[in-house]
């Protein structure tokens, strides 16, 4: 299961400066969960808030590291959620902490997904974001721990790995219960260069655990698809 719930590392003043960054919605895979169900949900797209980035090759020595747990996180999309609604209170802008303003009424499942994943796109096009030490706030983009827009199939978090480190998959390993990882998912993950630019909420990470940002969920049953996954015993190349 996913659980980045990003921990801000920068000042609110810096985040406010970042709030002018805008973009188009992302289509991502869903948060990590241990599931073997494969549905017809298509692969997530990379038309994210931040344009798809080509990460340049690193000149840093590369290290192959084994035994990694891999989870995923995503941006929830309000239009894919329905059911009972709830009022959400928080900050109407990024430069604020633990606010108590009325941010609107949303499906309870959407508000819960935002709290679990850290970000969600509302029907209005704004982003409802959440962090453990700030609560909910409205924004123009999903944010990483440095206040920059998250990038699908690039942004990642891993305790103990320096910010800016690049990660490539050597092997996807296996599902936690021992089954094979979905071939299309593994192929996409291996074709991507991930960059450590995000951070776990304290207590949700751990040794040899990497969480990968997939972008926006692409349907109401996204968390039942092969993209919403957890790997065990993955082998990573870190530079």
Image: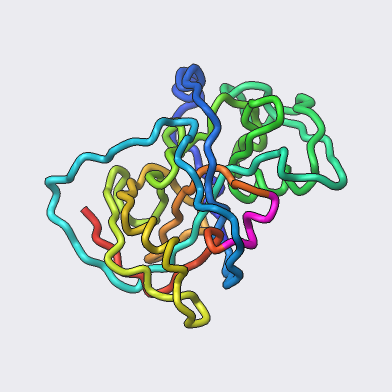
Q: Quadrant of residue 236?
A: bottom left
Answer with left or right where residue 209 lies relative to residue 125.
left
- What x and y, as percent, mark residue 194? 34, 49
Residue located at (55% from left, 32% from top): 25
Answer with left or right where residue 110 lies relative to residue 238.
right
Report the number of numbered marks. 0
In the image, residue 36 sits, relative to residue 211, either above or below, namely below
- What x and y, as percent, mark residue 237? 24, 61
Residue located at (53% from left, 51% from top): 29
Judge whether residue 206 can be spotted in this image. Answer: no
What's the magenta region? 220-225
Quadrant in which the N terminus appears: bottom right
In the image, residue 100 sits, relative to residue 170, either above or below, namely above
Residue nearest the viewer, comparing 129 with 11: 129
Q: Residue furthest bottom?
A: 178
Residue located at (36% from left, 61% from top): 187
Judge whether residue 117 can be spotted in this image. Answer: yes
Q: Residue furthest right?
A: 84
Answer with left or right where residue 26 lies relative to residue 91.
left
Q: Quadrant of residue 133?
A: top right
Residue nearest the viewer, comparing 195 with 132: 195
- What x and y, as percent, mark residue 165? 27, 48
74 in magenta: no
Residue located at (47% from left, 21% from top): 21
Colour mode of the rendering: rainbow
- What x and y, as percent, mark residue 122? 68, 32
């Amino acid at each position: 299961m996913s659980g980045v719930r990003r921990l801000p590392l920068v000042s609110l003043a810096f985040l406010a400066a970042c709030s002018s960054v805008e973009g188009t919605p992302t289509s991502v895979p869903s948060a990590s969960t241990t599931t073997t169900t494969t549905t017809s949900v298509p692969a997530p797209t990379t038309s994210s808030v931040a344009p798809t980035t080509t990460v340049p090759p690193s000149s840093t020595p590369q290290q192959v590291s084994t035994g990694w747990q891999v989870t995923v996180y995503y941006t929830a999309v309000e239009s894919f959620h329905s059911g009972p609604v709830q009022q959400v209170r928080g900050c109407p802008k990024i430069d604020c902490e633990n606010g108590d303003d009325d941010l609107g009424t949303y499906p309870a499942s959407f508000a819960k997904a935002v709290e679990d994943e850290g970000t969600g796109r509302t029907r209005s096009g704004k982003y409802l974001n959440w962090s453990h030490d700030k609560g909910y706030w409205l924004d123009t983009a999903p944010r990483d721990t440095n206040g920059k827009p998250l990038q699908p199939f690039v942004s990642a978090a891993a305790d103990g790995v320096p910010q800016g480190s690049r990660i490539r998959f050597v092997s996807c390993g296996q599902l936690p219960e021992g089954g094979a990882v979905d071939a299309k998912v593994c192929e996409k993950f291996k074709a991507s260069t991930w960059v450590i630019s995000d951070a776990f909420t304290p207590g949700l990470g751990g040794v040899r655990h990497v969480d990968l940002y997939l972008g926006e969920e692409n349907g109401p049953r996204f968390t039942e698809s092969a993209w919403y996954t957890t790997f065990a015993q993955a082998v990573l190349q870190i530079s």
